[in-house]
Image (cartoon, rainbow, N blue to C red):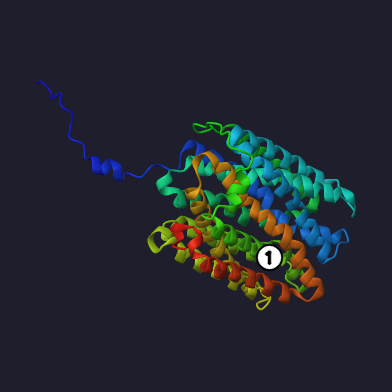
């Protein structure tokens, strides 16, 4: 019996409505590398305790924590163009390898002195390009129509590694001291190098845009609102990433993993089950509400100095970070031109280094001159101030936010 050679009718609308896949091989490899880097990176929220053991006070701890941001800022001024010219993969591999070496270097530090400053500078030289390249690569491989959702899923690697890494870090410190923690960081960073080496650069064509592009990006009116929000967001993060552990120790709470585990778990939960909420309710509304949650969480830290208080404030700050970062990232990437995406994302991540560079010593100074209450209150006000300033500049850009 003859069979028809005519093709079956195709429902073009159903094909067009089929969502592009997110969980590709490249996505899985990048996710694994991001997770490994996170396992090494997140436990550094415990570094202020290490620095305190070396004899440093609150202000100098802030200075040392901010030192990494100096080199992070400087290297990103260069690396943005390199991401667009040379591609993302070489920088991912090189930066992850340097981060592994830096982790080993901390093992050799046993007193206050110049070596710790040098290591902090190298720390920034590795982490700065690393996170800029990770974010840019993720933006490259996630379908444009699902970018906010895809970046939310990709960010799970960072938050999940935080939930695990800080608990594991506190256990390693208690079991074998800080050298065990630093060795662990070197090992998992090496695994990240392997995962990044297996990536395939997606149809990369080097850009030859001018070195003046960075200044144009900084002053581009489409981004002004986003830069304001990103900087004030990062200043808020710097308060508890730098000083939550010393504060907890001062009130008899030795285990800050309650805060960071809740923080990361909430962020992971909303990125899995609430990744589409910004599209459903509007990115402006969700972003504003999430940054408001962040500010409330920060200001409540000193007013709820209990284990349950750490969990509640961790939840509020986790909501802020869990929605704030991917929404800002998605809008910035969408507004950016394809040929300068690496530079735009690099400047965006650079602002988080600037936030820590300014915030860590500033918050440490406020603690020295005032108290933890003064410091956390000021940090919360900065986050709220960013929202107010952004709303006042509605005509300056960020059309997807409605400003």
Residue extending furthest left?
Answer: 1
The single residue placed furthest to the top in the displayed view is: 2
**Residue located at (83% from left, 47% from top):** 118
Counting the numbered discs, the total is: 1
The answer to whether 165 is drawn above or below residue 208 in the figure is below
The reply, left or right, for residue 130 in relation to residue 20 is: right
The quarter of the picture where residue 300 lies is bottom right
Q: Does residue 235 lie above or below 73 as drawn?
A: below
Q: Position of residue 162 (x, y in %)?
A: 62, 55
Seen at 53% across and 69% down, the residue is: 392
Check disc 1 and report the residue beneath it: 240
One can see residue 293 in this view: no
Q: Residue at x 88, y 61 (%)?
A: 55
Residue 382 placement: quadrant: bottom right
Nearer the observer, 322 or 315: 322
Q: Tell me if residue 349 can be seen.
A: yes
Q: Is residue 298 left or right of residue 372?
A: left
Percent x, y of residue 195: 60, 36
Q: Position of residue 41 (x, y in %)?
A: 68, 50
The residue positioned farthest toward the bottom in the image shown: 303
Asked which quadrant contains residue 186, the reply is: top right
- Where does residue 278 sit, x and y in percent of width and height? 43, 60
What residue is at 75 percent from the left and 73 percent from the top?
252
Dividing the image into 4 quarters, which one contains the N terminus?
top left
Q: Is residue 86 left or right of residue 11?
A: right
Q: Residues within 10 Å of mark 1 (few under 14, many from 20)?
A: many
187 or 88, nearer to the observer: 88
Q: Secondary structure at mark 1?
A: helix
């Amino acid at each position: 019996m003859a069979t028809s050679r005519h093709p079956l009718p195709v429902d073009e609308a159903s094909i067009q409505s089929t969502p592009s896949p997110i969980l590709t091989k490249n996505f899985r490899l990048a996710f694994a590398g991001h997770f490994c880097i996170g396992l090494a990176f997140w436990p550094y929220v415990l570094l202020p305790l290490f620095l305190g053991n070396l004899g440093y006070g609150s202000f100098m701890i802030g200075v040392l924590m901010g030192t990494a941001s100096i080199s992070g800022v400087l290297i990103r001024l260069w690396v943005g163009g390199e991401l667009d010219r040379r591609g993302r993969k070489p920088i991912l591999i090189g930066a992850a390898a340097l981060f592994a070496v830096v982790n080993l270097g901390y093992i050799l530090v046993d007193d206050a002195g110049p070596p710790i400053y040098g290591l902090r500078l190298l720390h920034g030289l590795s982490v700065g390009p690393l996170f800029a390249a990770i974010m840019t690569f993720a933006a490259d491989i996630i379908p444009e129509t699902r970018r906010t959702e895809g970046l939310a899923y990709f960010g799970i690697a960072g938050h999940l590694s935080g939930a695990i890494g800080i608990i594991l870090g506190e256990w390693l410190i208690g079991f074998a001291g800080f050298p065990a923690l630093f060795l662990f960081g070197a090992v998992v960073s090496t695994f990240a190098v392997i995962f990044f080496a297996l990536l395939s650069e997606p149809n990369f064509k080097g850009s030859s845009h001018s070195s003046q592009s960075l200044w144009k990006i900084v002053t581009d009116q489409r981004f002004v609102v986003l830069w304001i929000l990103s900087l004030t967001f990062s200043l808020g993060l710097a308060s508890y990433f730098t000083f939550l552990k010393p504060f907890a120790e001062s009130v008899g709470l030795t285990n800050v993993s309650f805060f960071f585990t809740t923080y990361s778990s909430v962020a992971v939960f909303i990125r899995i089950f609430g990744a589409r909420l910004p599209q459903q309710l509007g990115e402006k509304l969700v972003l504003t509400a999430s940054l408001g949650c962040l500010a409330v969480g920060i200001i409540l830290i000193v007013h709820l100095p209990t284990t349950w208080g750490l969990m509640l404030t961790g939840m509020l700050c986790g909501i802020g970070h869990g929605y704030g970062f991917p929404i800002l990232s998605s809008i910035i990437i969408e507004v950016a031109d394809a040929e300068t995406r690496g530079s735009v994302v690099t400047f965006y991540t650079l602002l988080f280094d600037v936030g820590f560079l300014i915030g860590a010593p500033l918050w440490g100074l406020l603690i020295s001159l005032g108290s933890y209450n003064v410091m956390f209150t000021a940090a919360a006000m900065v986050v709220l101030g960013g929202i107010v300033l952004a709303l006042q500049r509605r005509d300056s850009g960020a059309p997807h936010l409605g400003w």
